[in-house]
């Protein structure tokens, strides 16, 4: 006859397992913190590197052969990776930070949640605001500027190209705003999303 299992052993294991497992909001918050730390380390390191470039490069030029190649490659890699790591770390911090606000967590932090949501709104709508600023600046000055290829279109001398440029920025602004709103709508207005 098989021995009976100890009472409440499976029940206690089942009750302790969920408590030890981190919730999805807590995991997202940890990822956001890691991304923020990467950004906070990479940003000043990149600034320090670029500010010391005038001093570093003459020292590297004095080297020869494999030493010069290794030092120049390392400097170029650091110049490329540093700002990229800072930007990606910040974006991941905002992404996972916003995700953590709308997922279950063990501890509530309403003040931090509001700050994260506010930062996320600014970051998500920044491209649309930048496009709107370009349109407002063009209308105020009568000139619209494009970087590549570098050209200026004036309302007084080339109105068709000027209004095409304004229309381009308006379309891009509307597209950026629509994409940002599609992301934020289920978070800010969950009831209206459920009805749709």
Image (cartoon, grey):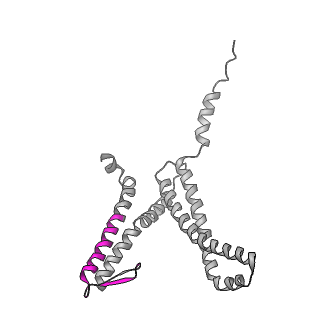
**Residue 72, position in %: x, y?**
67, 76
The residue closer to the viewer here, 127 or 168, is 168
Q: Which residue occupies 75% across, 81% down?
A: 64
Question: Which quarter of the picture shows residue 58?
Answer: bottom right
- Left/right placement of residue 25 relative to residue 183 reads right
Q: Residue at x 34, y 84 (%)?
A: 152
Q: Position of residue 20 (x, y in %)?
A: 62, 42
| Outermost residue to the bottom | 157
Indicate the quadrant where residue 183 lies.
bottom left
Is residue 18 depicted above or below 104 in this figure? above
Q: Position of residue 76 (x, y in %)?
A: 63, 74
- Using the image as rendered, state which of residue 10 and residue 37 is in the foreground: 37
Of all residues, the one furthest to the top in this rendering is 1
The foreground one among 171 and 47 is: 171
Q: Which stretch appears magenta?
A: 148-175
Residue 5 location (% of width, % of height): 67, 22
Q: Residue 2 in magenta?
A: no
Q: Quadrant of residue 181?
A: bottom left
Q: Residue at x 72, y 78 (%)?
A: 68
Q: Main secondary structure of the magenta part?
A: helix
């Amino acid at each position: 006859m098989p021995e009976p299992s100890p009472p409440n052993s499976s029940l206690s294991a089942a009750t302790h397992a969920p408590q030890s497992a981190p919730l999805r909001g807590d995991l997202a918050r940890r990822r956001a913190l890691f991304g923020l730390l990467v950004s906070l380390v990479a940003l000043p390191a990149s600034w320090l590197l670029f500010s010391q470039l005038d001093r570093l490069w003459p020292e590297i030029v004095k080297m020869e052969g494999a030493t010069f190649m290794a030092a120049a490659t390392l400097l170029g890699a650091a110049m490329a990776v540093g700002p990229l790591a800072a930007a990606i770390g910040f974006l991941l911090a905002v992404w996972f930070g916003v995700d953590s606000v709308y997922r279950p967590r063990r501890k509530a932090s309403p003040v931090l949640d509001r700050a994260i949501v506010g930062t996320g709104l600014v970051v998500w709508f920044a491209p649309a605001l930048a496009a709107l600023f370009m349109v407002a600046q063009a209308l105020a000055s009568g000139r619209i500027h494009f970087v590549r290829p570098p050209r200026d279109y004036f309302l007084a001398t080339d109105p068709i190209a000027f209004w095409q440029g304004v229309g381009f920025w308006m379309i891009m602004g509307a597209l950026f705003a629509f994409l940002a709103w599609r992301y934020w709508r289920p978070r800010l207005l969950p009831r209206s999303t459920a009805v749709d």
